[in-house]
Every structure is written in C-alpha cells, then in structure tokens.
Image (cartoon, grey):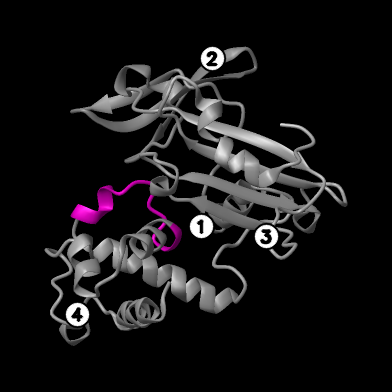
Amino acid sequence: MGMFEKRRFRKFLLFVLHFNEHDVKSHQDIEPRRMTMREVYRKFDLGPEVMAFTGHALALYRTDDYLDQPCLETINRIKLYCESLAKYSKSPYLYPLYGLGELPQGFARLSALYGGIYMLKKPVDEILMEKGKVVGVKSEGKVSSETMGHIAHCKQLICDPSYVPNQVKKVGQVIRVICILSHPIRNTNECTSCQIIIPQMQVNRKSDIYVCMVSCSHCVASDGKYVAIISTTVESENPESEIQPALELLEPVDQK
C-alpha cells in the first residue's frame, strides 16, 4: 500500500471497529442491509488489491460473490477478525493441542454438562421425516438377543451426506494435500504455525487457495517436523496443477 491508501484503509478499519448494527450514528451514511460491499469499498476509495486482502484475508470469503451482497455480514466478519487479533495478539486463530480431534472431545464434555446423550456404534436404520422435515432417527439395538427399536426425536439433524443420498447433490469438489516438511515456511519469520491465503485474483482463479501449517508446538508432529495442509476448490480436470502456487511456497517438501 502507498501512504495515501494506508490512510484510507485505516479510516475504513476505524469505521469497522466503531460500527454497531443498532447504532445509526456509527453507520456513517451507510445502509448496512441495502448497500453492497462493493459500494462501501468505493465510498472509502479502496483499490482492488486492498479489496482482495480485506475480503479474503480478513473477512475470509473464498470467492468475490460477497461484493454484490449487503455489506452487514462482511463488516461483522472483519470486526470479528480485528477483535480476535486484539485479544490473542499474535493471531486471531485458536488451534487445539493434539489436533482437531480435541474439538469433538471438548464438545462432548460441554454437551454432557447440558444433559446431552451420546450413543456410540449405533447403526442408523431410518431417518424419520414428516412434511419434508426431519423429526427423528430410528436405530435398532439388541439386548439379550431381543431386538428393540430406539427412536431419537429431533428438530435438526447433522449428518454425513451418505445417510441421505437422495436429498443431497454434488455441487463441488475439493483437493487437499498434506505435506510433511523439515523446516518452517519461508518468509514467515520462522513461525511454528501460520495460515496463508492466496486470493483467487492473484492466481487467476475463482476461489482462494488455503495453506495451514502446524508443528510440534501443537503436539501434532515430531520435533523439527512441520505439517502443512493445502486446500482449494477444484476448478479444472487437473487439480494438482491448481495448487502449484502453494506447493512452491513450501519447497522443499519431504513427503506429500
């Protein structure tokens, strides 16, 4: 950014930090439910490079579709990023020690406090529907060689698509590459963890490329080893060529 663009961007960030959805005085003549994000960028005179950085690295959108949608959600996303960065100082992200498997464990403990019940290794025989809405899950369980039916009633169901093959359709495909490194990623100040976002406009794509790196400091790798995960939405018939810009950032790679 040049000096003048830095001033304009600072003015934009101050607007975001002081923005309150319920306080009209903080809106600065912006109608958050009607004005698009493209119009907001124009109001603060921000260029395409700053727009790409803001929308993809701060608001964490993977495509540019958000530009022509009401700006309220984007402003709240940027505000959340800024507040998280202020709270945790080095990064807005939290990553669990011992890997993502700790997340369901944490959820299980919290769920138990609120009366949640876990039934493990229970086959799902039928998902019960009424008027097009899910109302329960039926599972058969055996007790003393007698078959008993169990129904868990619910208003909402979260499941793998394989449980409801007739109610889902494939809308996209993702390529994910796990890379084992013996060094931190170049130009990251020897960081033991980082997230790199390559905005789609930088590599002539429709969606961003994400790189997430973790290491022994998260108890997920041996000393001196780093694990980098590259992922993006597949847009061609040669998915591996699509993630080459990210692979080049990681070289040399021990194994992928």
Q: Give the CA distance from mark 1 to mark 3.
A: 45 Å
Above/below status of 248 relative to 84? above
Please state which of residues 236 and 170 is positioned toward the viewer in this rendering. 236
Mark 4, mark 2: which one is toward the viewer? 4
Q: Give the CA distance from mark 2 to mark 1.
A: 30 Å
Tell me the element at label 3. Answer: loop
Q: Between disc 3 and disc 4, whose residue precedes?
A: 4
Asked whether disc 4 touches disc 2, contact meaning CB atoms under 8 Å apart, the reply is no
- Residue found 34% across the figure and 27% down from its top: 171
- Residue type, label 1: Tyr
- Residue type, label 2: Thr
- What label does residue 187 carry, if any? 3
Residue marked by disc 2:
147
- Residue type, label 3: Asn
Image quadrant where one finds the N terminus: bottom left
Would you say residue 62 sits in the magenta stretch? yes
Residue marked by disc 1:
114
For disc 3, the neighbor class at 10 Å (few under 14, some 14 to 19, many from 20) is: few
First to last magenta residue range: 57-68
Please state the horizontal and vertical placement of residue 8, each as a whole percent of the image.
32, 79
Q: Give the CA distance from mark 4 to mark 1.
A: 39 Å
Mark 3, mark 4: which one is toward the viewer? 3
Q: Give the CA distance from mark 3 to mark 4.
A: 38 Å
Asked whether disc 2 touches disc 1, contact meaning CB atoms under 8 Å apart, the reply is no
